[in-house]
Image (cartoon, rainbow, N blue to C red):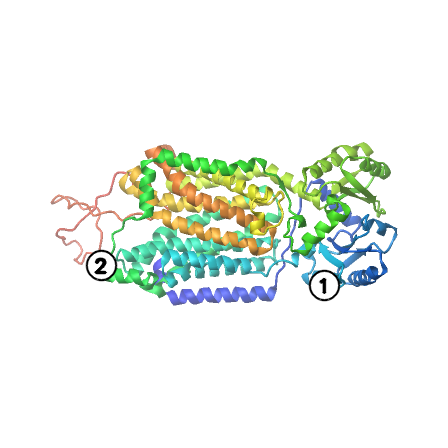
């Protein structure tokens, strides 16, 4: 395949360009139809939402808030009311707005003004959920409300729909990540052409993946988070996979191979590892399906499609592009040295070789230091608390954060996360009275019933992200509602977040066991060893613990949040462990495959474990570290995405990849393999006979044996023999069939 793509490079390039533009045109014509199908079946909050949607369809949509504050006087003053009321009436008349409840109308309006009279709010209820409300409508609401501002009158808006229109321009994070990756590639290769190759491969793979995901959104439910995560993982693996292949190709050229043979060798070695690594990433992503959280299905589809297309680009488009460049994939200095001094011997040198020899001399010291570093970083994970971020975690410059702070200032911290107790039977009066007497409740208001359903708004005394609010939800469900004899359910955004965190935590062990088990089986078949996949599984767990420790320290404890301009500390998003562990296990397996495949290749040739580990580490550590540095840059760039979940995932994955590559794969793994010795490659004979053969590295051509004895049979001959049939061939080398199974 590599030879065909190299020789027909123009055809391959035109096919890829045509496919990219064709998919892009189709996707732009069809538009997007992303749907955040966020369903938690059999949870209390889901039952509350279903009742709300049935009895109050106009209130089942997203409810956002317009908040205003005066520097002096009162919000009830005539001049303030003359500016705010017309704006609210205009918003109420917009198509897609179901209701606007302000402080200037109705008997309940007085409760929407703070005690000091300086802060008031109005609730804007859309007819659809936040992700379904058109951005144009939301922007009109924002412009209309903020158009009422004047000196001494400040207007801010909060809510999930409002948050969508203040995100940075789409593609900013991707562009920053590509620029950072280009800098690292240029420093690694010293050649502009070599630098451009991995970026071109990643752009084609990610572009096709995003267009394909957009088209698939019309036939299945794909959340709008999917393309963001797909581009994040696609850029990382696309650049890394091309980097591994280009590095092997450049090594072949420096050894004196012709460009075509060097491409074929690179594809038949590193290309095989890329195929295997891409498969492990897709399997790790598919592990999300066992959680039975339906909104993750679309994430699996989008990210897996992008990874598959990135692998396809690396194994077909890249050989074609290498064919166009020829020896120019080397830097000018390398080409000049190759012409003057001839081919270089294939040996590792420099810092990588010295480090590899140092690990071999002191494996216990290196392993102990690496374990200490990872253990210290993993300590914060003991205080991990899953939940959901809200506008209180936004940057202080955003209107959503300022509205959040104004409401907390005027009405208390619990006002930003009210609970909705939805009752469809029983003694509602006793229920309201019981809620009012519950510790941790600041305010209770029962809305007029409709269709036999009553909604009781409950404002806690604590913030939505506090443990006390979670405990209040449990108290209402387990004690207050049963004691009142009512048929009621606790809903609202805060209750949904709590239920989601609970469901995710319950299913996380099964998820982790699934992806570790699948990864173990893949490595077992690939390297025909029990110890290598077992070591990889343990290392993956260590990397996960340390990376989540960093995540807790940054986002939950607030270390460095101001430096990163990521807002305020809070709990870790409940969906993040599932998504992050999938990506982490897939990427960790990539580095394990590239590292151990080279070690395994050397072990097959020499049966010397110490040499295999030393050579494998010396020859792959530099490219693994370069690949990891690129991934770190790409992931950190997603801090600029404007999405708190993507920013959290970016920081967590950047920490995970850095620790995995710089500590585990270049220190702890080789040190452990030195200590384990030849047992690294142990596999029971009975299991070896039953396992299918899957070679990550290509089979070696059998070396010519000595000439057979005169007159002896020649059972096997290799090559074309220009002789008539049956004519003898003098001094023809033959290789007798081996009676031993060749290790793979």
Q: Tell me: residue 101, above or below residue 691.
A: below
Residue with the mark numbered 2: 341
Circle 2 crowding by C-alpha within 10 Å: few under 14, some 14–19, many from 20: few
Image marks 1 and 2: residues in contact by CB distance under 8 Å: no
Q: Hey, which residue is sitting farthest right in the picture? A: 107
Residue with the mark numbered 1: 143
Q: In the figure, residue 98 lies in which quadrant?
A: bottom right
Helix, strand or loop at label 1? It is: helix
* In-image side of 72 versus 358 (left or right): right
- Of the pair 382 and 504, the residue shown nearer to us: 382
* In-image side of 415 versus 560 (left or right): right
Q: Answer with mark 1 or mark 2, whichever residue precedes in sequence.
A: 1
Place of residue 152 in the rendered image (x, y in percent of width and height, measured from the top left): 76, 59
Helix, strand or loop at label 2? It is: helix
- Of the pair 593 and 441, the residue shown nearer to us: 441
Res 205 visible: no
Place of residue 351 in the rendered image (x, y in percent of width and height, measured from the top left): 33, 47
Q: Quadrant of the N terminus?
A: bottom left
Q: Write the residue at 74% across / 58% down.
A: 155
């Amino acid at each position: 395949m590599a030879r065909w793509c190299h020789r027909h490079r123009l055809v391959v390039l035109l096919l890829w360009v045509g496919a990219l533009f064709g998919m892009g045109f189709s996707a732009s014509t069809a538009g997007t139809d992303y749907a955040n199908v966020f369903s938690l079946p059999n949870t209390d909050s889901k039952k509350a939402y279903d009742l709300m949607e049935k009895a109050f369809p106009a209130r089942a949509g997203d409810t956002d808030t317009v908040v205003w504050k005066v520097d002096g006087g009162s919000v009830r003053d005539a001049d303030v009311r003359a500016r705010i009321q017309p704006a609210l009436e205009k918003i109420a008349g917009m198509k897609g707005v179901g209701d606007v409840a302000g402080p200037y109308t109705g008997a309940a309006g007085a409760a929407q003004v703070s005690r000091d009279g300086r802060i008031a709010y109005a609730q804007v209820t859309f007819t659809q959920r936040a992700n379904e409300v058109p951005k144009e409508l939301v922007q009109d609401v924002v412009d209309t409300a903020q158009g009422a501002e004047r000196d001494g009158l400040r207007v801010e808006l909060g809510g999930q729909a409002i948050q969508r229109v203040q995100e940075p321009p789409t593609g900013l994070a991707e562009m920053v990540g590509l620029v950072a990756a280009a800098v690292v590639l240029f420093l690694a290769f010293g050649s502009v052409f070599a630098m451009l190759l991995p970026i071109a491969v990643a752009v084609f793979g990610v572009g096709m993946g995003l267009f394909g995901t957009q088209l698939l959104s019309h036939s299945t439910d794909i959340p709008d988070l999917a393309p963001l995560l797909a581009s994040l993982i696609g850029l990382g693996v696309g650049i890394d996979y091309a980097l591994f292949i280009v590095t092997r190709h450049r090594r072949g050229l420096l050894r004196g191979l012709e460009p075509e043979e060097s491409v074929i060798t690179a594809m038949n070695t590193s290309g095989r590892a890329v195929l295997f690594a891409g498969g492990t990433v897709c399997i790790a992503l598919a592990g999300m399906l066992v959680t039975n959280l339906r909104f993750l299905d679309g994430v699996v589809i989008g990210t897996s499609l992008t990874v598959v297309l990135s692998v396809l680009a690396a194994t077909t488009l890249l050989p074609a592009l290498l064919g166009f460049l020829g020896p120019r994939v080397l830097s000018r200095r390398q080409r000049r040295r190759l012409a003057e001094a001839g081919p270089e011997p294939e040996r590792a040198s420099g810092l990588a070789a010295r480090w590899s020899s140092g690990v071999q001399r002191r494996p216990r010291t290196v392993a102990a230091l690496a374990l200490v570093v990872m253990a210290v970083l993993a300590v914060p994970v003991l205080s991990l608390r899953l939940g959901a971020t809200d506008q209180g975690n936004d940057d202080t410059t955003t209107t959503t954060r300022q509205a959040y702070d104004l409401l907390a200032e005027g009405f208390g911290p619990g006002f930003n996360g009210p609970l909705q107790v939805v009752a469809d039977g029983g003694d509602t009066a006793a229920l309201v009275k019981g809620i009012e007497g519950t510790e941790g409740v600041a305010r209770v208001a029962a809305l007029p019933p409709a269709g036999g359903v009553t909604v009781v708004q409950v404002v806690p005394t604590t913030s939505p992200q506090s443990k006390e609010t979670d405990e209040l939800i449990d108290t209402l469900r387990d004690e207050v509602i049963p004691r009142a004899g009512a048929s009621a359910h606790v809903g609202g955004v805060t209750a949904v977040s709590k239920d989601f965190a609970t469901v995710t935590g319950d299913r996380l062990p099964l998820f982790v066991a699934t992806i570790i088990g699948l990864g173990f089986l893949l490595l077992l078949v690939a390297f025909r060893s029990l110890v290598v996949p077992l070591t990889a599984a343990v290392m993956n767990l260590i990397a996960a613990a340390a990376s989540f420790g960093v995540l807790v320290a940054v986002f939950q404890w607030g270390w460095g949040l101001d430096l990163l301009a990521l807002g305020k500390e809070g709990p870790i998003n409940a969906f993040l462990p599932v998504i992050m562990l999938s990506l982490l296990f897939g990427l960790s397996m990539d580095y394990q495959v590239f590292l151990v495949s080279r070690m395994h290749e050397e072990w097959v040739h020499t049966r010397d474990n110490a040499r295999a580990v030393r050579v494998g580490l010396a020859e792959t550590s530099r490219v693994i570290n370069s690949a990891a540095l690129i991934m770190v840059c790409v992931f950190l760039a997603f801090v600029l995405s404007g999405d708190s979940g993507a920013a959290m995932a970016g920081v967590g994955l950047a920490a995970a990849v850095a620790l995995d590559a710089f500590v585990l794969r270049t220190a702890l793994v080789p040190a452990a393999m030195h200590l384990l010795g030849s047992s690294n490659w142990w596999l029971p004979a009975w299991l070896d006979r039953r396992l299918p053969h899957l070679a990550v590295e290509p089979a070696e051509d059998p070396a010519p044996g000595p000439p057979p004895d005169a007159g002896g049979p020649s059972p096997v001959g290799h090559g074309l023999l220009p002789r008539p049939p049956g004519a003898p061939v003098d001094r023809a080398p033959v290789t007798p069939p081996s009676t031993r199974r060749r290790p793979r």
